Amino acid sequence: MAWVTGHQLRLFNSLGRRIEDFTPSADVVGLYSCGPTVYSYQHLGNMRPYVFADTLRRALRWHGIPVRHVVNITDVGHAVADSDTGEDKLEVAAARERRSVEEIADFYTQDWLAALAALNVQPADVYPRASAYVAAMIEFAKRLEDKGYTYRLPSGLYFDTAKSPGYGTLALMDIAGQREGERVEIVEGRKHKSDFALWRAEEPGVRRIMRWDSPWGWGAPGWHLECSVMSMSLLGDHFDVHTGGIDHRELHHVNEIAQSEAYLEDGRPWVRYWLHNEFILLDAQKIAKSAGHTLRLADLVESGYHPMAYRLFLLGGHYRSQLDFTTTAMDAVQATLRRLIAKIDPLRPLPPAETLAGALALLGAPAAGSAAAAVHDKAALGYIDAIDAAISNDLATPKLLATLQDALRDPDITADGLRVVVAAADALLGLRLGELKPAEVDQRRTADELAPGAREEIERLIAERTQARADKNWPRADEIRVELDALGVQVTDTPDGPAWQLR
Ligand code: AMP
Ligand code: ZN
Protein backbone atom coordinates (compact mmCIF):
# COMPACT_ATOMS: atom_id res chain seq x y z
CA MET A 1 0.00 0.00 0.00
CA ALA A 2 1.56 3.28 -1.07
CA TRP A 3 -0.79 5.50 0.90
CA VAL A 4 -4.17 5.46 2.51
CA THR A 5 -6.92 7.15 0.57
CA GLY A 6 -9.59 6.89 3.24
CA HIS A 7 -12.74 4.83 3.33
CA GLN A 8 -16.20 6.25 2.72
CA LEU A 9 -18.14 6.56 6.00
CA ARG A 10 -21.12 4.23 5.78
CA LEU A 11 -23.93 4.03 8.32
CA PHE A 12 -27.00 1.86 8.80
CA ASN A 13 -30.05 4.04 8.19
CA SER A 14 -33.16 2.76 9.99
CA LEU A 15 -35.12 4.67 7.37
CA GLY A 16 -34.91 2.02 4.64
CA ARG A 17 -33.00 -0.41 6.88
CA ARG A 18 -29.79 -0.42 4.88
CA ILE A 19 -26.17 0.65 5.06
CA GLU A 20 -25.70 3.89 3.14
CA ASP A 21 -22.88 6.27 2.32
CA PHE A 22 -22.96 9.17 4.74
CA THR A 23 -22.86 12.49 2.93
CA PRO A 24 -23.29 15.69 4.96
CA SER A 25 -25.85 18.15 3.61
CA ALA A 26 -24.31 21.15 5.39
CA ASP A 27 -20.90 22.43 6.49
CA VAL A 28 -21.79 21.46 10.03
CA VAL A 29 -23.72 18.24 10.50
CA GLY A 30 -26.74 18.61 12.78
CA LEU A 31 -26.99 15.66 15.19
CA TYR A 32 -29.89 15.22 17.60
CA SER A 33 -29.99 12.47 20.21
CA CYS A 34 -33.07 11.76 22.31
CA GLY A 35 -32.05 12.35 25.89
CA PRO A 36 -33.17 11.03 29.24
CA THR A 37 -36.38 11.58 31.14
CA VAL A 38 -34.91 12.85 34.38
CA TYR A 39 -37.24 11.37 36.97
CA SER A 40 -34.84 8.72 38.33
CA TYR A 41 -31.29 7.44 37.98
CA GLN A 42 -30.17 6.39 34.52
CA HIS A 43 -29.34 2.69 34.50
CA LEU A 44 -26.52 0.97 32.64
CA GLY A 45 -28.68 0.41 29.57
CA ASN A 46 -29.56 4.10 29.34
CA MET A 47 -25.88 4.96 28.96
CA ARG A 48 -25.51 3.07 25.70
CA PRO A 49 -27.27 5.62 23.44
CA TYR A 50 -24.82 8.33 24.52
CA VAL A 51 -21.67 6.23 24.19
CA PHE A 52 -22.99 5.23 20.77
CA ALA A 53 -23.69 8.86 19.76
CA ASP A 54 -20.24 9.76 21.09
CA THR A 55 -18.69 7.08 18.86
CA LEU A 56 -20.57 8.54 15.92
CA ARG A 57 -19.26 12.02 16.75
CA ARG A 58 -15.72 10.68 16.99
CA ALA A 59 -16.15 8.95 13.61
CA LEU A 60 -17.34 12.21 12.02
CA ARG A 61 -14.40 14.08 13.54
CA TRP A 62 -12.05 11.35 12.20
CA HIS A 63 -13.44 12.13 8.75
CA GLY A 64 -12.99 15.86 9.28
CA ILE A 65 -16.75 16.56 9.44
CA PRO A 66 -17.80 19.25 11.98
CA VAL A 67 -20.85 18.46 14.10
CA ARG A 68 -23.34 20.34 16.24
CA HIS A 69 -24.78 17.93 18.76
CA VAL A 70 -28.02 18.50 20.66
CA VAL A 71 -29.21 16.15 23.43
CA ASN A 72 -32.51 17.06 25.06
CA ILE A 73 -33.50 16.66 28.66
CA THR A 74 -37.10 15.58 29.14
CA ASP A 75 -38.19 17.35 32.31
CA VAL A 76 -41.86 17.54 31.34
CA GLY A 77 -44.30 15.84 29.02
CA HIS A 78 -43.43 12.19 29.50
CA ALA A 79 -46.55 10.67 30.97
CA VAL A 80 -46.29 7.45 32.94
CA ALA A 81 -45.80 4.25 30.94
CA ASP A 82 -45.08 6.13 27.69
CA SER A 83 -48.77 6.93 27.40
CA ASP A 84 -50.47 10.08 26.17
CA THR A 85 -52.56 10.57 29.27
CA GLY A 86 -52.21 10.49 33.00
CA GLU A 87 -49.64 11.88 35.37
CA ASP A 88 -46.24 13.10 34.29
CA LYS A 89 -43.28 10.90 35.30
CA LEU A 90 -41.61 13.91 36.92
CA GLU A 91 -44.64 14.69 39.04
CA VAL A 92 -44.90 11.11 40.24
CA ALA A 93 -41.22 11.18 41.25
CA ALA A 94 -41.63 14.53 43.01
CA ALA A 95 -44.52 13.17 45.08
CA ARG A 96 -42.58 9.98 45.86
CA GLU A 97 -39.43 11.80 46.95
CA ARG A 98 -41.19 14.81 48.50
CA ARG A 99 -39.15 17.19 46.40
CA SER A 100 -40.17 19.77 43.82
CA VAL A 101 -40.20 18.76 40.17
CA GLU A 102 -37.33 21.20 39.55
CA GLU A 103 -35.26 19.57 42.28
CA ILE A 104 -35.99 16.13 40.85
CA ALA A 105 -35.05 17.22 37.33
CA ASP A 106 -31.86 18.98 38.48
CA PHE A 107 -30.71 16.16 40.70
CA TYR A 108 -31.11 13.41 38.10
CA THR A 109 -29.76 15.58 35.29
CA GLN A 110 -26.57 16.24 37.25
CA ASP A 111 -26.21 12.57 38.12
CA TRP A 112 -26.60 11.63 34.44
CA LEU A 113 -24.08 14.25 33.29
CA ALA A 114 -21.58 13.00 35.87
CA ALA A 115 -21.98 9.44 34.57
CA LEU A 116 -21.46 10.64 30.99
CA ALA A 117 -18.28 12.47 32.04
CA ALA A 118 -17.02 9.34 33.82
CA LEU A 119 -17.62 7.43 30.59
CA ASN A 120 -15.58 10.04 28.67
CA VAL A 121 -18.56 11.03 26.52
CA GLN A 122 -17.85 14.40 24.96
CA PRO A 123 -20.38 17.01 26.09
CA ALA A 124 -23.10 17.95 23.63
CA ASP A 125 -23.15 21.51 22.32
CA VAL A 126 -26.57 22.10 23.84
CA TYR A 127 -28.71 20.25 26.39
CA PRO A 128 -32.12 21.89 25.97
CA ARG A 129 -34.73 21.29 28.64
CA ALA A 130 -38.23 20.58 27.41
CA SER A 131 -39.80 22.87 30.02
CA ALA A 132 -38.02 25.87 28.45
CA TYR A 133 -39.60 25.20 25.04
CA VAL A 134 -43.28 24.89 25.88
CA ALA A 135 -44.21 28.20 24.21
CA ALA A 136 -42.52 27.02 21.00
CA MET A 137 -44.32 23.67 21.28
CA ILE A 138 -47.66 25.46 21.53
CA GLU A 139 -46.83 27.49 18.39
CA PHE A 140 -45.83 24.30 16.59
CA ALA A 141 -49.08 22.55 17.55
CA LYS A 142 -51.12 25.63 16.54
CA ARG A 143 -49.60 25.50 13.07
CA LEU A 144 -50.49 21.81 12.78
CA GLU A 145 -54.03 22.67 13.84
CA ASP A 146 -54.24 25.50 11.28
CA LYS A 147 -53.13 23.10 8.57
CA GLY A 148 -55.86 20.63 9.52
CA TYR A 149 -53.70 17.82 10.87
CA THR A 150 -55.31 17.69 14.29
CA TYR A 151 -58.55 17.27 16.19
CA ARG A 152 -59.64 18.22 19.67
CA LEU A 153 -60.87 15.88 22.38
CA PRO A 154 -61.61 16.66 26.03
CA SER A 155 -58.27 14.99 26.83
CA GLY A 156 -56.30 17.28 24.56
CA LEU A 157 -55.18 18.00 21.01
CA TYR A 158 -54.48 14.94 18.86
CA PHE A 159 -52.46 14.45 15.71
CA ASP A 160 -54.52 12.70 13.03
CA THR A 161 -52.09 10.13 11.66
CA ALA A 162 -54.38 9.28 8.73
CA LYS A 163 -53.50 12.74 7.31
CA SER A 164 -49.80 11.92 7.34
CA PRO A 165 -48.72 10.29 4.08
CA GLY A 166 -46.28 7.50 4.79
CA TYR A 167 -47.06 7.39 8.49
CA GLY A 168 -45.03 4.68 10.19
CA THR A 169 -42.51 4.09 7.36
CA LEU A 170 -39.61 4.20 9.83
CA ALA A 171 -41.13 1.41 11.87
CA LEU A 172 -42.16 -0.59 8.77
CA MET A 173 -45.60 -0.20 10.26
CA ASP A 174 -48.56 -1.95 8.76
CA ILE A 175 -50.80 1.06 8.26
CA ALA A 176 -53.84 -0.89 7.11
CA GLY A 177 -53.97 -2.77 10.37
CA GLN A 178 -52.81 0.12 12.51
CA ARG A 179 -51.76 -1.37 15.73
CA GLU A 180 -53.11 -0.59 19.10
CA GLY A 181 -49.56 -1.36 20.15
CA GLU A 182 -48.68 -2.52 23.61
CA ARG A 183 -47.39 0.93 24.30
CA VAL A 184 -50.35 2.87 22.95
CA GLU A 185 -53.24 3.15 25.34
CA ILE A 186 -56.89 3.50 24.47
CA VAL A 187 -58.08 7.07 24.44
CA GLU A 188 -61.75 7.90 24.41
CA GLY A 189 -62.73 9.39 21.04
CA ARG A 190 -59.42 8.89 19.28
CA LYS A 191 -60.07 8.42 15.55
CA HIS A 192 -57.21 6.04 14.80
CA LYS A 193 -55.29 3.86 17.11
CA SER A 194 -51.99 5.47 16.17
CA ASP A 195 -53.14 9.09 16.76
CA PHE A 196 -51.16 10.74 19.51
CA ALA A 197 -51.44 13.71 21.83
CA LEU A 198 -49.75 16.99 20.95
CA TRP A 199 -51.28 18.59 24.00
CA ARG A 200 -52.43 16.76 27.12
CA ALA A 201 -55.24 18.72 28.74
CA GLU A 202 -55.72 18.56 32.49
CA GLU A 203 -58.43 16.16 33.52
CA PRO A 204 -61.38 18.01 35.10
CA GLY A 205 -60.77 18.50 38.80
CA VAL A 206 -57.09 17.54 38.58
CA ARG A 207 -54.57 20.33 38.74
CA ARG A 208 -51.13 19.38 37.50
CA ILE A 209 -47.97 20.87 38.99
CA MET A 210 -46.39 21.48 35.60
CA ARG A 211 -49.14 23.28 33.71
CA TRP A 212 -49.31 25.83 30.95
CA ASP A 213 -52.20 27.68 29.40
CA SER A 214 -52.86 26.90 25.74
CA PRO A 215 -55.59 27.19 23.12
CA TRP A 216 -56.56 23.65 24.21
CA GLY A 217 -56.84 24.48 27.88
CA TRP A 218 -54.43 24.17 30.77
CA GLY A 219 -52.14 21.22 30.51
CA ALA A 220 -48.79 20.00 29.27
CA PRO A 221 -47.26 19.13 25.89
CA GLY A 222 -47.14 15.58 24.53
CA TRP A 223 -43.86 13.77 24.75
CA HIS A 224 -43.15 13.43 21.00
CA LEU A 225 -43.68 17.11 20.33
CA GLU A 226 -40.71 18.22 22.40
CA CYS A 227 -38.06 16.52 20.28
CA SER A 228 -39.39 17.94 17.00
CA VAL A 229 -39.53 21.44 18.45
CA MET A 230 -36.18 21.45 20.23
CA SER A 231 -34.27 19.86 17.36
CA MET A 232 -35.71 22.25 14.77
CA SER A 233 -35.19 25.26 17.04
CA LEU A 234 -31.52 24.40 17.55
CA LEU A 235 -30.51 22.68 14.32
CA GLY A 236 -32.81 24.21 11.70
CA ASP A 237 -35.86 22.78 9.92
CA HIS A 238 -33.86 19.96 8.37
CA PHE A 239 -30.78 18.30 9.75
CA ASP A 240 -28.74 15.22 9.00
CA VAL A 241 -28.77 12.70 11.84
CA HIS A 242 -31.18 11.69 14.59
CA THR A 243 -30.26 8.96 17.08
CA GLY A 244 -31.88 7.08 19.92
CA GLY A 245 -32.54 3.67 21.40
CA ILE A 246 -34.18 1.06 19.20
CA ASP A 247 -37.48 1.34 21.10
CA HIS A 248 -37.84 4.88 19.73
CA ARG A 249 -37.81 3.56 16.16
CA GLU A 250 -41.23 2.02 16.68
CA LEU A 251 -43.22 4.91 18.14
CA HIS A 252 -41.51 8.08 19.35
CA HIS A 253 -39.52 8.68 16.16
CA VAL A 254 -42.42 7.63 13.95
CA ASN A 255 -44.51 10.36 15.58
CA GLU A 256 -41.69 12.91 15.48
CA ILE A 257 -41.42 12.38 11.72
CA ALA A 258 -45.18 12.57 11.15
CA GLN A 259 -45.65 15.86 12.97
CA SER A 260 -42.45 17.46 11.65
CA GLU A 261 -43.16 16.64 8.02
CA ALA A 262 -46.72 17.86 8.46
CA TYR A 263 -45.37 21.08 9.96
CA LEU A 264 -42.86 21.62 7.13
CA GLU A 265 -44.96 20.25 4.22
CA ASP A 266 -42.03 20.75 1.87
CA GLY A 267 -42.00 17.27 0.35
CA ARG A 268 -38.52 16.52 1.73
CA PRO A 269 -37.63 14.02 4.40
CA TRP A 270 -37.31 15.92 7.67
CA VAL A 271 -34.12 14.12 8.80
CA ARG A 272 -31.92 12.13 6.42
CA TYR A 273 -30.32 9.47 8.65
CA TRP A 274 -31.97 7.68 11.57
CA LEU A 275 -29.62 5.62 13.72
CA HIS A 276 -30.68 3.39 16.59
CA ASN A 277 -28.74 1.44 19.19
CA GLU A 278 -29.87 -1.97 20.37
CA PHE A 279 -30.53 -2.73 24.00
CA ILE A 280 -28.32 -3.92 26.81
CA LEU A 281 -29.86 -6.99 28.38
CA LEU A 282 -29.62 -7.91 32.02
CA ASP A 283 -30.69 -11.48 32.64
CA ALA A 284 -31.65 -11.53 28.98
CA GLN A 285 -34.25 -8.81 29.48
CA LYS A 286 -34.16 -5.21 28.44
CA ILE A 287 -32.85 -3.24 31.38
CA ALA A 288 -35.71 -0.88 31.94
CA LYS A 289 -36.46 1.51 34.72
CA SER A 290 -40.09 0.45 34.63
CA ALA A 291 -39.07 -3.20 35.30
CA GLY A 292 -37.42 -2.04 38.48
CA HIS A 293 -33.81 -2.45 37.29
CA THR A 294 -31.69 0.44 38.33
CA LEU A 295 -28.18 -1.00 38.07
CA ARG A 296 -26.09 2.11 37.60
CA LEU A 297 -22.57 3.01 36.61
CA ALA A 298 -22.01 4.16 40.21
CA ASP A 299 -22.81 0.61 41.38
CA LEU A 300 -20.15 -0.81 39.08
CA VAL A 301 -17.59 1.70 40.33
CA GLU A 302 -18.45 0.81 43.88
CA SER A 303 -17.83 -2.85 43.08
CA GLY A 304 -14.31 -1.99 41.89
CA TYR A 305 -14.83 -1.65 38.13
CA HIS A 306 -13.43 1.31 36.27
CA PRO A 307 -15.96 3.34 34.22
CA MET A 308 -13.72 2.79 31.20
CA ALA A 309 -14.23 -0.95 31.66
CA TYR A 310 -17.95 -0.39 31.09
CA ARG A 311 -17.18 1.74 28.05
CA LEU A 312 -14.95 -1.08 26.79
CA PHE A 313 -17.79 -3.53 27.43
CA LEU A 314 -20.09 -1.37 25.28
CA LEU A 315 -17.55 -0.93 22.49
CA GLY A 316 -16.81 -4.66 22.49
CA GLY A 317 -20.23 -5.14 20.90
CA HIS A 318 -21.55 -3.48 17.76
CA TYR A 319 -24.10 -0.80 18.58
CA ARG A 320 -26.76 -2.63 16.56
CA SER A 321 -26.32 -5.86 18.52
CA GLN A 322 -27.92 -6.66 21.81
CA LEU A 323 -25.39 -7.11 24.58
CA ASP A 324 -25.80 -9.26 27.66
CA PHE A 325 -24.59 -7.53 30.75
CA THR A 326 -23.01 -9.99 33.21
CA THR A 327 -20.47 -9.65 35.98
CA THR A 328 -18.37 -12.27 34.18
CA ALA A 329 -18.23 -10.00 31.15
CA MET A 330 -17.33 -7.04 33.39
CA ASP A 331 -14.49 -8.99 34.98
CA ALA A 332 -13.20 -9.88 31.53
CA VAL A 333 -13.26 -6.30 30.22
CA GLN A 334 -11.66 -4.95 33.37
CA ALA A 335 -8.81 -7.46 32.90
CA THR A 336 -8.51 -6.53 29.22
CA LEU A 337 -8.38 -2.84 30.08
CA ARG A 338 -5.72 -3.50 32.67
CA ARG A 339 -3.57 -5.34 30.12
CA LEU A 340 -4.10 -2.65 27.50
CA ILE A 341 -3.00 0.10 29.88
CA ALA A 342 0.01 -1.91 31.06
CA LYS A 343 1.17 -2.29 27.44
CA ILE A 344 0.47 1.30 26.46
CA ASP A 345 1.88 3.01 29.54
CA PRO A 346 5.54 2.73 28.42
CA LEU A 347 4.64 4.27 25.03
CA ARG A 348 3.41 7.54 26.49
CA PRO A 349 3.06 10.38 25.72
CA LEU A 350 0.88 9.66 22.69
CA PRO A 351 0.68 12.17 19.83
CA PRO A 352 -2.66 13.83 18.96
CA ALA A 353 -4.25 11.85 16.09
CA GLU A 354 -7.94 12.72 16.05
CA THR A 355 -8.42 12.60 12.31
CA LEU A 356 -7.35 10.27 9.54
CA ALA A 357 -5.48 13.17 7.92
CA GLY A 358 -3.73 13.91 11.22
CA ALA A 359 -2.70 10.28 11.75
CA LEU A 360 -1.34 10.04 8.21
CA ALA A 361 0.59 13.28 8.61
CA LEU A 362 2.20 11.93 11.80
CA LEU A 363 3.32 8.86 9.87
CA GLY A 364 4.76 11.02 7.11
CA ALA A 365 2.27 9.54 4.66
CA PRO A 366 1.21 11.70 1.74
CA ALA A 367 -2.40 12.62 1.21
CA ALA A 368 -4.10 10.98 -1.73
CA GLY A 369 -3.06 12.51 -5.03
CA SER A 370 0.08 14.23 -3.81
CA ALA A 371 3.54 13.03 -4.77
CA ALA A 372 4.57 9.96 -2.82
CA ALA A 373 6.84 10.66 0.11
CA ALA A 374 8.74 8.29 2.33
CA VAL A 375 6.58 6.26 4.65
CA HIS A 376 8.79 4.87 7.34
CA ASP A 377 6.44 2.50 8.98
CA LYS A 378 4.38 0.50 6.52
CA ALA A 379 2.99 -1.70 9.29
CA ALA A 380 1.62 1.33 11.16
CA LEU A 381 0.13 2.66 7.95
CA GLY A 382 -1.64 -0.65 7.43
CA TYR A 383 -3.17 -0.44 10.90
CA ILE A 384 -4.35 3.13 10.33
CA ASP A 385 -6.03 1.92 7.17
CA ALA A 386 -7.65 -0.95 9.09
CA ILE A 387 -8.87 1.44 11.81
CA ASP A 388 -10.31 3.72 9.16
CA ALA A 389 -12.01 0.77 7.44
CA ALA A 390 -13.51 -0.47 10.72
CA ILE A 391 -14.97 2.83 11.93
CA SER A 392 -16.20 3.72 8.44
CA ASN A 393 -18.04 0.41 8.23
CA ASP A 394 -21.04 1.44 10.35
CA LEU A 395 -18.87 2.09 13.42
CA ALA A 396 -17.45 -1.43 13.78
CA THR A 397 -15.86 -0.88 17.18
CA PRO A 398 -15.23 -4.62 17.89
CA LYS A 399 -13.09 -4.76 14.74
CA LEU A 400 -11.33 -1.57 15.75
CA LEU A 401 -10.45 -3.07 19.14
CA ALA A 402 -9.13 -6.21 17.48
CA THR A 403 -6.97 -4.08 15.19
CA LEU A 404 -5.53 -2.23 18.16
CA GLN A 405 -4.70 -5.55 19.85
CA ASP A 406 -3.03 -6.80 16.65
CA ALA A 407 -0.89 -3.67 16.43
CA LEU A 408 0.19 -4.03 20.07
CA ARG A 409 1.36 -7.58 19.34
CA ASP A 410 3.07 -6.83 16.02
CA PRO A 411 6.85 -7.19 16.14
CA ASP A 412 7.27 -5.29 12.87
CA ILE A 413 5.82 -1.96 13.97
CA THR A 414 8.09 0.84 15.21
CA ALA A 415 7.48 2.43 18.61
CA ASP A 416 6.62 5.75 16.94
CA GLY A 417 4.29 4.03 14.51
CA LEU A 418 2.58 2.21 17.36
CA ARG A 419 2.11 5.49 19.24
CA VAL A 420 0.24 6.92 16.26
CA VAL A 421 -1.89 3.77 15.90
CA VAL A 422 -2.82 3.73 19.59
CA ALA A 423 -3.62 7.45 19.55
CA ALA A 424 -5.76 7.09 16.43
CA ALA A 425 -7.63 4.08 17.82
CA ASP A 426 -8.32 5.90 21.05
CA ALA A 427 -9.49 9.06 19.32
CA LEU A 428 -12.34 6.82 18.14
CA LEU A 429 -12.72 4.54 21.15
CA GLY A 430 -12.42 7.23 23.82
CA LEU A 431 -10.98 4.83 26.41
CA ARG A 432 -8.44 7.41 27.68
CA LEU A 433 -5.64 5.07 26.71
CA GLY A 434 -3.18 7.94 26.67
CA GLU A 435 -3.71 8.98 30.26
CA LEU A 436 -5.18 6.27 32.49
CA LYS A 437 -2.68 5.27 35.17
CA PRO A 438 -2.09 1.54 35.54
CA ALA A 439 -2.88 1.90 39.24
CA GLU A 440 -6.34 3.32 38.41
CA VAL A 441 -7.41 0.17 36.57
CA ASP A 442 -5.34 -2.15 38.70
CA GLN A 443 -7.89 -2.51 41.43
CA ARG A 444 -6.86 -6.02 42.36
CA ARG A 445 -9.93 -7.27 44.04
CA THR A 446 -9.77 -9.94 46.68
CA ALA A 447 -11.96 -12.96 46.28
CA ASP A 448 -14.20 -11.59 49.04
CA GLU A 449 -15.04 -8.58 46.91
CA LEU A 450 -16.11 -10.58 43.88
CA ALA A 451 -19.44 -9.76 42.32
CA PRO A 452 -22.27 -12.11 43.21
CA GLY A 453 -22.05 -15.31 41.18
CA ALA A 454 -18.47 -14.75 40.04
CA ARG A 455 -16.92 -17.03 42.67
CA GLU A 456 -19.26 -19.88 41.68
CA GLU A 457 -18.41 -19.32 38.02
CA ILE A 458 -14.64 -19.42 38.75
CA GLU A 459 -14.96 -22.55 40.84
CA ARG A 460 -17.07 -24.23 38.19
CA LEU A 461 -14.40 -23.47 35.56
CA ILE A 462 -11.61 -24.76 37.80
CA ALA A 463 -13.51 -28.00 38.47
CA GLU A 464 -14.08 -28.40 34.74
CA ARG A 465 -10.37 -27.82 34.09
CA THR A 466 -9.40 -30.44 36.69
CA GLN A 467 -11.74 -32.91 35.01
CA ALA A 468 -10.38 -32.03 31.54
CA ARG A 469 -6.85 -32.65 32.79
CA ALA A 470 -7.89 -35.97 34.34
CA ASP A 471 -9.41 -36.90 30.96
CA LYS A 472 -6.19 -35.74 29.23
CA ASN A 473 -8.35 -33.30 27.24
CA TRP A 474 -5.51 -30.77 27.01
CA PRO A 475 -7.15 -28.46 24.43
CA ARG A 476 -10.17 -27.96 26.73
CA ALA A 477 -7.94 -27.48 29.78
CA ASP A 478 -6.01 -24.79 27.90
CA GLU A 479 -9.21 -23.11 26.75
CA ILE A 480 -10.40 -22.88 30.33
CA ARG A 481 -7.08 -21.43 31.43
CA VAL A 482 -7.52 -18.67 28.85
CA GLU A 483 -11.04 -18.02 30.13
CA LEU A 484 -9.81 -17.83 33.70
CA ASP A 485 -7.01 -15.57 32.60
CA ALA A 486 -9.55 -13.20 31.06
CA LEU A 487 -11.34 -13.11 34.40
CA GLY A 488 -8.08 -12.12 36.07
CA VAL A 489 -7.84 -15.47 37.87
CA GLN A 490 -4.46 -17.10 38.41
CA VAL A 491 -4.51 -20.86 39.04
CA THR A 492 -1.62 -22.69 40.71
CA ASP A 493 -1.55 -26.48 40.81
CA THR A 494 -0.53 -27.65 44.26
CA PRO A 495 -0.19 -31.21 45.63
CA ASP A 496 -3.57 -30.58 47.29
CA GLY A 497 -5.20 -29.65 44.00
CA PRO A 498 -5.60 -26.32 42.22
CA ALA A 499 -5.50 -23.04 44.19
CA TRP A 500 -6.55 -19.71 42.74
CA GLN A 501 -6.21 -16.02 43.40
CA LEU A 502 -7.12 -12.81 41.64
CA ARG A 503 -4.32 -11.08 39.85
P1 AMP B 1 -35.43 6.94 28.84
O1 AMP B 1 -34.84 7.83 29.88
O2 AMP B 1 -36.11 5.74 29.39
O3 AMP B 1 -36.27 7.70 27.84
O4 AMP B 1 -34.21 6.31 27.99
C1 AMP B 1 -33.14 7.08 27.52
C2 AMP B 1 -32.52 6.41 26.33
O5 AMP B 1 -31.99 5.13 26.69
C3 AMP B 1 -33.46 6.14 25.18
O6 AMP B 1 -32.78 6.45 23.96
C4 AMP B 1 -33.77 4.67 25.27
O7 AMP B 1 -34.08 4.12 24.02
C5 AMP B 1 -32.45 4.13 25.78
N1 AMP B 1 -32.53 2.87 26.52
C6 AMP B 1 -33.40 2.55 27.50
N2 AMP B 1 -33.15 1.33 27.99
C7 AMP B 1 -32.07 0.83 27.30
C8 AMP B 1 -31.31 -0.40 27.33
N3 AMP B 1 -31.58 -1.39 28.18
N4 AMP B 1 -30.26 -0.53 26.48
C9 AMP B 1 -29.95 0.45 25.63
N5 AMP B 1 -30.62 1.63 25.54
C10 AMP B 1 -31.67 1.82 26.36
ZN1 ZN C 1 -36.93 12.21 21.34
Image (tube, rainbow, N blue to C red):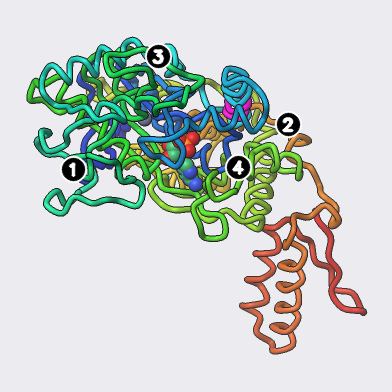
Mark positioned earlier in the residue sequence (1 or 4): 1
Give how far apart the Cα atoms at labels 1 and 4 are. Answer: 43 Å
Q: Is residue 172 left or right of residue 357?
A: left
Q: Is residue 71 magenta?
A: no
Q: Residues within 10 Å of mark 3 (few under 14, many from 20)?
A: some
Q: Residue at x 37, y 44 (%)?
A: 246
Q: Residues within 10 Å of mark 1 (few under 14, many from 20)?
A: some
Q: Could you say where residue 243 lies in the image, as x and y percent from the top left? A: 35, 33
Q: Which residues are magenta?
A: 111-116
**Which amino acid, mark 4?**
Tyr
Q: Which is more foreground, mark 3 or mark 2? A: 3
**Which amino acid, mark 1?**
His
Establish whether ligand 2 lies closer than 8 Å to the Cβ of label 3: no
Q: Residue at x 60, y 48 (%)?
A: 293
Q: Front-most of 79 and 491?
A: 79
Residue 173 vs 356, above or below: the answer is: below
Label placed on residue 212: 3
Give how far apart the Cα atoms at labels 4 and 2 are. Answer: 17 Å
